[in-house]
Amino acid sequence: MSGDPFQVRFHSKLGVVIYDPLAQMGIAKEQMRLFKITSMSMTTFRRDIVSKDLGAGEPDVVEESAQAVDAYRTARAAKLKPYCTGCRRHFGSVDFSICMDCTAVRCTCGLCACVARKKKAA
């Protein structure tokens, strides 16, 4: 997992999380946006509260999350447009999730590549 532009970390209450510098754009410096592996979603937290419990974590715990980290990596690399094609919100300004079916970013409006293909076909 080295060489990635993001860091895979462990939080005592949140579990395995991803800290992505790209996801920090557009939020106040007192805030921190983390991708939670358990829910496959990005969430914004208060930096002073969440950062004190971030650590490297046990390698076996992080390794168990490898498939989810790969899904995040794929979605991050495949994000051709920086905004949702449905609601036009910028992905850097919303707490999005990752669709495990198509490994694409799912906006808070519910649109992902699966839904977009179904709408286009109809």
Image: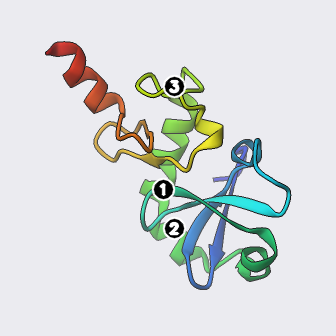
Q: Is residue 75 above or below residue 66?
A: above
Q: Is residue 31 above or below residue 59?
A: above
Quadrant of the image occupied by residue 113: top left
- Give the Cα separation between the discs numbered 2 and 3: 35 Å
Q: Mark 3 or mark 2, which is nearer the start of the sequence?
A: 2
The location of residue 94, given as percent across then percent down, is 58, 45
At mark 2, the secondary structure is helix
What is the crowding at mark 1: few (fewer than 14 residues within 10 Å), some, or many (at least 20)? many
In the picture, which quadrant includes the C terminus? Answer: top left
Of 42 and 56, nearer the camera is: 42
Neighbours of disc 2 within 10 Å: few (<14), some (14-19), many (20+): few
Q: Residue at x 69, y 46 (%)?
A: 23
Q: Which is more foreground, mark 2 or mark 3?
A: 3
- Are the two marked residues, 1 and 3, in contact with CB atoms closer than 8 angstroms? no
Three-letter amino acid code at the position of disc 1: Ser
Question: Mark 1 or mark 3: which comes first in sequence?
Answer: 1
Quickly name the residue at label 2. Answer: 63
Give the labeled residue for mark 1: 41
Is 18 placed left or right of 55 in the picture?
left
Residue position marked by numbered label 3 in the rendering:
88
